[in-house]
Amino acid sequence: MPLVETEKLNLHVRSGATPLHILRDVTFHIDPGEVVAVVGPSGSGKTSLLMVLAGLEQASGGLVRIDGQDVTALDEDGLAIFRRRTLGVLFQNFHLIPTMTALENVMLALELSDTGQPVDALRAASVKALESVGLEDRLYHLPNALSGGEQQRVGLARAVVTGPRLLLADEPTGNLDQETGARVIDTMFAIAQEHQRAVLLITHDPALAARANRRLVMTKGVLHGDGERPAA
Amino acid sequence: MKHLGDWLRVAMLDLRGGVGRFAVLLACLALGVGIIAAVGSVGGALQDAVAREARTLLGGDIEAEISYRPANQDELKVLHSLGKVTEVVEISARATREAKSSFLNLRAVDAAYPLVGTVATEPQTGDLASLLAKKNGAFGAVVDPRVLEQLGIGVGDRFRIGSGTFFVSATIRSLPDQAAMGFSIGAPVLVSTTSLSQAGLLVPGVLARYRYKILLTGAYDAAEKAIKAMSPDAGWEVRAPKDAASGLRRFFDMFTRFLQLVGLSTLFVGGVGVSNAVSAYLGERQRAIATMKSLGATHARIGVHFLAQIMVLALIGSGIGLVLGVVASLVILPVLGGLLSLSVAPSVAPLSLLVALLFGLLVAFVFALPALMSTRYIRPAALFRSAGGMVVEFGSLGREWRNKWFGLPMAAALLAILGLVLAVTGRPLLVLWYAVGALVSFAILRAAAAALKRIVKRLPPMPGFALRQAISSIHRPGALSVTIVQSLGLGLALLIAIALVGTNLRSQIAGQVARDAPSFVMFNMTAPDLEGLKAYVASQKRIVSFDSLPVARGVVTEIGGRKVADIKDLPRGIARYFEGDQVFTWQARERGDEQITEGKWWASDYSGPQLVSLGEDLRKPLGIKVGDSLTIVISGRPIAARIASFRRIDERRPRPDFNLVFSPGVIQNAPATYIATIKVASGAETAIQSELARQFPNLAFVPVGDALRRIEVLVGQLSNAIAAIGGLAVVSGILVLAGALSAGRRQREAEAVVMKVLGATRRDVAAAYLVEYGLLGALSTVIAAILGSIAAWAVVTYVLELSFSLDLGLIAGVLVAAVSISIATGLATTWSTLSLRPAGFLRGE
């Protein structure tokens, strides 16, 4: 049974008098443990697809089922609870809270995930997550004291610390140089593989897309398949 | 410097169209400046009105007053030679109607009254003489509306004063000299001089004040000399128009100065808002500043650029404040004029407005400068590093003081503020205490907020996401804790201090004083009156205690071997004891609660040379000691006495006390009246009052409960008026709070979006905000309560010399209100973060 399943997914927005079709009948699936890359030119609807999957954008029509849950049927609070239990999200712009240390940023995700664990356990898990991305000596640094690559690795630790079944990554290397980006991606792939997590990766980078099990191409809101590879 | 013009032009271009975003800065300055301008204008206009109306308030060009007796034929001849004269006789009396009675400040006037101004009555029928004329066997009386209420009668109805019958011909709307009379317990009533003798009130020995008001035909000085020369030792008091309302003028002056300090405090609270607004503005412009620096702009160039913008905004804010102040004073003045029976023309005091404007500009400068200095720490390199907002902190204050761009201008501005406060209040000691109080309050609030940040940082993890997030928000870098505690705390401290002083005053009147006070005070009693009263008291089981004292008057002419006329430069409070008549008493036994500070009381059977016990307050200013001599002239006869002791006179004790208490002896021959106090069993006041009024129609007595209630209402109104203006400091604090939260809203939105992406519900976010704002509001109130209580304790204990009690109910009320306001303001300004759609925000990034 696929982990992610969409069927005739549509997203329209009005731009002045004309409706703008951002996603058109998008139907695809992701299996557990599979890494899928979505490539396509800017403005093709890649980020919108990610937003709809994360429940951050309301689809205009169609179905999104993740881990057996019809995401389109959830209200705002239901979506929030769904995200904390099922998803991890990694952004191009990191979106760390600038007034929180690296450790606090990571811990925030655990604090929201209703694990029922004591704070010390949450702290220990967050430290472990940061260690896993090689930031054990940056625990108490504020984001503006970290380099771009370090900030993205904090973002990655935050995205995976709750053990989500699906990791959504939007241009995770877009703001990083090639070498730093490669290091972040290596870490992300290693973590995904180790824990059998599915990943949907939005990227412009053909080399990065080539490392996925499957590559999908988005053009003007329409998703095309591009062959399949064995699961990671 | 040659480029300064260009720099300023660019600064103004840069500000163009952006003034609206400084709403909080403008509002904070406008509020503080508005209060100072309005208080200054209103105070100035009232002072002007008192000065302008001085002749009306006195009722002539000069007034000569003597007690107990009218002017004799020789004296009247002198008085009439000076100009047109009117005689006003003032006496305390009681009006009665069946079982009801009313305590009066009775004024008997002749046909010439008033020489200046008019008596306004309701209904307006005929002139005063016809209103006071005898009709159908009763004299007309123009009465205060209170009398109608207390006697349960209306215009046209009859009532009695002493043994005379009167009818109400009209009620008083205003008297020309009403404002100068100040607060009086008795209700004013005008009757004709002829009626007074028929009412049987002018019994020898009863205190009646005879005031002769004159419209002079010659110079004032010559008239004063002539009056003083006509009977040098008779105790004539002479007053000029400037003296008429000196008490009123002093009250206005004190009240104005005090309220201006309250206004300045509001401005200081607003200063925190200025500082926040400037910090937020510079925070948003950091990239622009970094860009300017990378293009070669010097620190001075950037400093001038932003300082010019801030000062233009300060000018706009202060200007709005001036307009508000002018409008407020134009609205308030006619109302106050009506209440005070003063003819106050709507006017604007340019000097007060200038002072308010200068305060606004200086406070804006002082609070903006530290934030402006932070631009020095913005590095062009930051342009290439920070992905989110840059957090730039001001350097340490100690280091900054050594910087010529900071230390010198800041010191000059602070000195200018102190100088202005000194000019406004005219009291160096008050300025010193105010400056210390303001600085200490700022420092304590700042230190307390910093301590809170440190403490909560070390706290063990709290249960629950909301509490943990709230605590984390309090100590995180860029947290608003200091701002919130400082802005809200300062305003609340001021409000709590004012409210506590008010409640202490009121509780003193309604509490201890009311419990210990007698039920009735009788005065102006003759010896037969006293005997009759004693007989009545002996027959009444409901009367718990009774006490009486003789009261006589004389002129002190010599003290400590020096003629009183030669003693100069006495403090105002002491000098008044030697102007005209001085009341005194004599008693054999020392009263139980007497506090002798030096010397000792005479034996109860003492019969030697005349001794006197003096109030402690007289000792130092006069440089006198036990054993010194004192001469008092009574009815033209000098009596020499020796000082036996000094006593502390505690005006809070609810019993009559005198600065001069003689031993029994020759002094007992002085013409005297008696004062008596009666305390009745609880609940018997009304019945005893009715019986007293019926059995002793000529007796002047005050039900103390009524008098205390009137005083309590007056004190309540005054403290409410001050608290209302003090409350504006809290409004300013709320503005600052709202401004600070609005400035940080972008950051809050970013945080809320990230939390939502991570799975936080709206409830989670709202709960975290709720706890955070509630905690900060509670902390602000707790510190404010401590500061405000200390200030109130100091005022109550050392200025009012009363015992201080903490009103925990009031503090709890302020705490609940402040926490609610803090939460409401916080949620109102950050509500948008709860309903923000994450997708839109994330794309916007």
Image (cartoon, coloured by chain):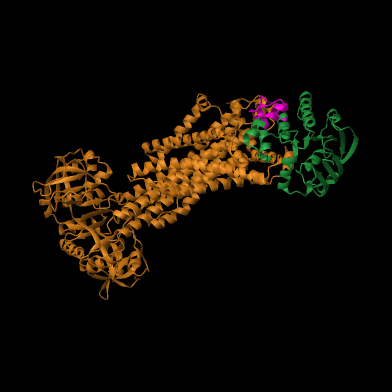
Q: Quadrant of residue B107?
A: bottom left
Residue B349 seen in the current view: no
Residue B205: say if magenta.
no
Instruction: Decide if residue B327 is on the left or right side of residue B625.
Output: right
Q: Quadrant of residue B567?
A: top left
Give residue B280's position: percent from left, percent from top.
Answer: 60, 36
Residue that protrudes farthest toward the left in the picture? B608
Give residue B33's position: percent from left, percent from top.
Answer: 49, 43
Give residue B639's position: percent from left, percent from top.
Answer: 11, 48
Magenta segment, which residues?
A125-152
Residue that protrudes farthest toward the right in the picture? A227
Give residue B434's position: percent from left, percent from top.
Answer: 41, 38
Indicate the colour of chain A.
green
**Residue in the foreground of this view, choosing between A116 and B313:** A116
Name the quadrant of the C terminus of chain A: top right
**Position above or below: A164 against B166:** above
Residue under the point 71% across and 31% down: A157
Indicate the colour of chain B.
orange
**Residue in the foreground of this view, choosing between A22 and A165:** A165
**Position above or below: B697 against B277:** below
Residue A145: say if magenta.
yes
Residue A62 seen in the current view: yes
Instruction: Decide if residue B271 is on the left or right side of residue A138.
Output: left
Name the quadrant of the N terminus of chain A: top right
